[in-house]
Amino acid sequence: MARSQDSYNKKEKEKQRHKKKQDKLKKKEERKAHSDKGKSLDDMIAYVDEDGKLSDTPPDPKKKKKFKAEDIEIGVSRQAEPDPEDLIRTGRVTFFNESRGYGFIKDSKSGESIFVHVNKVQEPVSEGDTVTFETEMGPKGPSAVNVRLQKSS
């Protein structure tokens, strides 16, 4: 008796190919059924309401606001120049290593610890001194510049 040319493995692979083909056709039909092609322009338009949310109904024309093109600012709004006196802060030197040339100042208002380098110190300072200073952004965060001992009143 002769054996069948198709082995079990070949039959299984053929079944899988057939099932894959059927799934592909089924997905194609679903895409066609749910396609946006053929819809009118009105069905595809989305509106933005006064709260900034998308909706499918047009906004109420009575609530429409008029703006002048000159009043619209694109980008970062301009900020007023800060008062030079507001830039000057006070704080206490919490750590200062003269041999290494750096230290830290604790800001009296914010409580933030700010780095200070010996090149930015106007007068010699030591730990515990109350100082006035300005800040600038350094590579690792804010750093103190123009550091001076606070004058006693």
Image: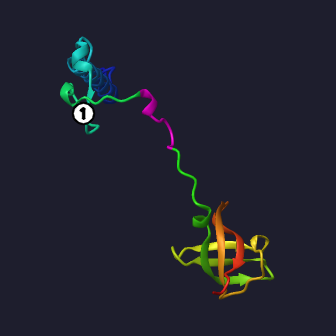
Whether the magenta-drawn stretch holds residue 101 is answered as no
Question: On the image, numbered disc 1 is attached to which residue?
Answer: 49
Q: How many labels does the image show?
A: 1
* Image quadrant where one finds the C terminus: bottom right
Report the side of 75 relative to 152 (left or right).
Answer: left
Q: Which residue is drawn at 51% across and 43% down?
A: 76
Report the side of 101 relative to 83 (left or right).
Answer: right
Q: Which residue lies furthest to the front in this view?
A: 153
Q: Which of 121 and 28 is in front in this view?
A: 121
Report the magenta residues as a range. Answer: 69-77
Tell me if residue 15 comes above or below residue 152 in the rendering: above
Dominant secondary structure (helix, strand or loop) of the stretch shown in magenta = loop
Q: Residue 49 location, x and y as percent? A: 24, 33
Q: Is mark 1 on a helix, strand or loop?
A: loop
Q: Can residue 81 be seen from the camera position used here?
A: yes
Q: Which residue is drawn at 26% across and 20% down?
A: 44
Q: Residue at x 63, y 78 (%)?
A: 105
Q: Which quadrant of the view contains residue 98?
A: bottom right
Q: Residue 97 location, x and y as percent? A: 74, 83
Tell me if residue 63 comes above or below residue 139 in the rendering: above
Q: Residue 104 location, x and y as percent? A: 65, 77
Q: Residue 66 location, x and y as percent? A: 31, 28
